[in-house]
Amino acid sequence: MTDNSRLIVALDLKVPDKAMELAREIHREIFAIKINWPLLMVAGVGIIRELSSYGRVICDLKIADIPNTNSLITSNVKENGGWGIITHAFTGSDSLAAVIEAAGEMKVFAVVSMSHPGSDQFINSVSMDLLEMAMKEKISGVIAPGNDLVMLRRIRNAGKGLMILSPGIGVQGGNPADAIRNGSDYVIAGRSIYNSEDPLGEVRRINSAVSSVIHRS
Ligand code: C5P
């Protein structure tokens, strides 16, 4: 994996061999791989270590439980070689603190806003409160939507120094260059890459769109 890329690829595949094959194809040109329940449920926790042989793996488990359970889930990811973990923040500061403590050196990213239409019903109305609480708990970074640039800018302005990862790119309507221009540090793309006829070509297209913004600023 490379620090020259601002792209995190969501491998939401249900066939582990396909996920490994895609990782092999694209890993040299991306910043990290993100995995989620669809792959983890089929492949088992060992897939974290297997994918880690290609570099950084972020486990998007959107943890939302009591502190003890959060801690157990996080330590499983850590023991299996995860580089980062994504947790919900709405469960409160004690639950979030349990993730951060169990994570140790691992990066912890909190969901403070989401990118799908239903996120406007509940979570997006408390995004700033979630962000403030997560910062008090010394979070590494947050998830902020790459397809809602107003929300993204609000989170960027209030979350000085935080690493911002933005999904919502591609199929959900967001544009990678716009997301970076409006405050994202890394964009997350899944379907637009793994459903593409040419995943590596799509990775390169996103990398070059993003680097034109970075080099201009
Ligand atoms: O396929 P697509 O590019 O839409 O995938 C986006 C990925 O980011 C999925 O793994 C999804 O679960 C995740 N995600 C998201 N919105 C959030 C948090 C995570 O789309 N707020």
Image: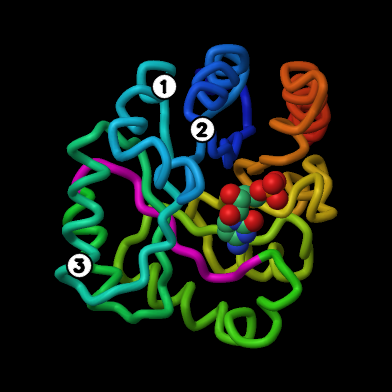
Residue 167 drawn at (x, y percent): 66, 51
Q: Nearer the viewer, residue 202 or 101?
A: 202
Residue 110 falls within the magenta-colored stretch: yes
Measuring 68% from the left and 41% from the top, which residue is drawn there?
Answer: 189
**In the rendered view, does 181 fall on the left or right side of 90?**
right
Circle 3: element type? helix
Among numbered discs 1 and 3, the one appearing first in the sequence: 1
Residue 81 relative to residue 128: left or right: left
Q: The magenta stretch spans which residues?
A: 104-114
Q: Position of residue 170 (x, y in %)?
A: 80, 45
Residue nearer the viewer, 110 or 20: 20
Name the spot of residue 187 as percent of width and height, x first: 66, 42
Q: How many marks?
A: 3
Residue 40 figure quarter: top left
Comes first in the chain, label 3 or label 2: 2
Q: Residue at x 67, y 87 (%)?
A: 121
Q: Which mark is residue 69?
A: 3
Q: Are marks 3 and 2 in contact (CB under 8 Å)?
A: no
Q: Amino acid at mark 3?
A: Thr
Distance CA(mark 1)–CA(mark 3)? 27 Å
Toward the viewer: 171 or 87?
A: 171
Q: Residue at x 32, y 62 (%)?
A: 138
143 in relation to 187, above or below: below
- In this view, 29 is above or below 79: above
Report the disc number at residue 33.
2
Which comes sooner in the sequence, label 2 or label 1? 2
